[in-house]
Amino acid sequence: MEAQRKRTLTQLLLASTILCGLTAPAIAQERSIDFGIGIGMPYSGIGASGRYFVTHNSAVQLSVGCVSLSNFISNACGPGISYEFTGFIANDFNRNHALGVYAGITGTENLVREETFSGYQRDIYGAGLYYSYYSNGFDSSGFHYGASSWVANETNRNGNKDAKLNISLHVGYRF
C-alpha cells in the first residue's frame, strides 16, 4: 500500500514537471506566474515548483519534492512554501540576486520503536534562508543556483530532539 502511494506521488511529480515545462511560457505572460524544476531547499528536495510574482521584485513559491529517492517505500516527499525578494543590492538592474525564506520538508530520519524494535521513518520539517543567483534575471526563464541554510528538529542518539543547522547548495531551472 505504501509502495503504491509512493509510486503514485512520484508519477504525479514527474507529470506535473512535464506539464509545467510545456505550459509555463503561455501562462507566465498572462498571470505573472512561472514554474521550475530543481534540486535543493527551494524545491523541497528534488522537485517542482510554481511561483506567483507579488511584485516585480518578490514572489511566493509553492513546491513539492522528495528529499530521498533511495527508498521508494518511505514517505520522503512533501511540500514547501517560500517567499523570495530581490532589489537588496544597489545597481542590480537585472535583479539577478534574490534572498528567500523557506518552510517545509527538509529531510527524513530513521527511528526504532524500543518496545517492538521495529524501524520507521519520520519526515523532518524545518525553516531556513537561502540566496539564489538568477543567470537571466529574477523574472526570466533560465538557470539559477545558490546556497541554503535551515534549522530542523532532528532526533539525537539519546532519543531527544535537537535543533540542527544544515547548509546545502541548490540549482534549478525556471520556465
Image (tube, rainbow, N blue to C red):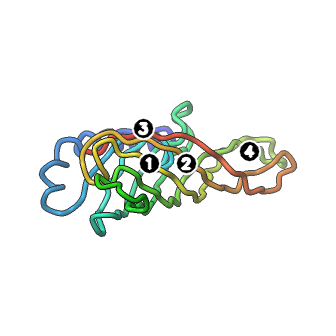
Name the secondary structure under disc 1. Answer: strand
User: x%, y% of residue 109?
Assistant: 67, 44
Of the image marks 3 and 1, the number of the one nearer the N terminus: 3
Name the secondary structure under disc 2. Answer: strand
Q: CA distance from mark 4 to mark 1?
A: 34 Å
Of the image marks 4 and 3, the number of the one nearer the N terminus: 3
Of the image marks 4 and 1, the number of the one nearer the N terminus: 4
Q: CA distance from mark 1 to mark 2?
A: 9 Å
Q: Kindly give the residue lying farthest to the top in the view shown.
A: 70
Q: Which residue is mark 4?
A: 111
Q: Which residue is mark 2?
A: 148
What amino acid type is highlighted by mark number 3?
Arg
On the question of residue 81 being in view, the answer is yes
Q: CA distance from mark 3 to mark 1?
A: 31 Å
> Which callout, 2 or 4, points to the residue nearer the camera?
2
Callout 4 crowding tier (Cα within 10 Å): few <14, some 14–19, many ≥20: some
Q: Report if the CB atoms under discs 3 and 1 are less than 8 Å apart.
A: no
Vertical order, 40 against 82 (above or below): above
Of the image marks 1 and 2, the number of the one nearer the N terminus: 1
User: x%, y% of residue 139?
Assistant: 27, 54
Callout 2 crowding tier (Cα within 10 Å): few <14, some 14–19, many ≥20: many
User: What's the residue at 41%, 46% (across, down)?
Assistant: 133
State left or right for residue 171 relative to residue 107.
left
User: What's the residue at 29%, 55% (across, down)?
Assistant: 93
Q: Which residue is mark 1?
A: 132
Of the image marks 2 and 3, the number of the one nearer the N terminus: 3
Name the secondary structure under disc 4. Answer: strand
What amino acid type is highlighted by mark number 4?
Leu
| Quadrant location of the C terminus in the rendered image | top left
Callout 3 crowding tier (Cα within 10 Å): few <14, some 14–19, many ≥20: some
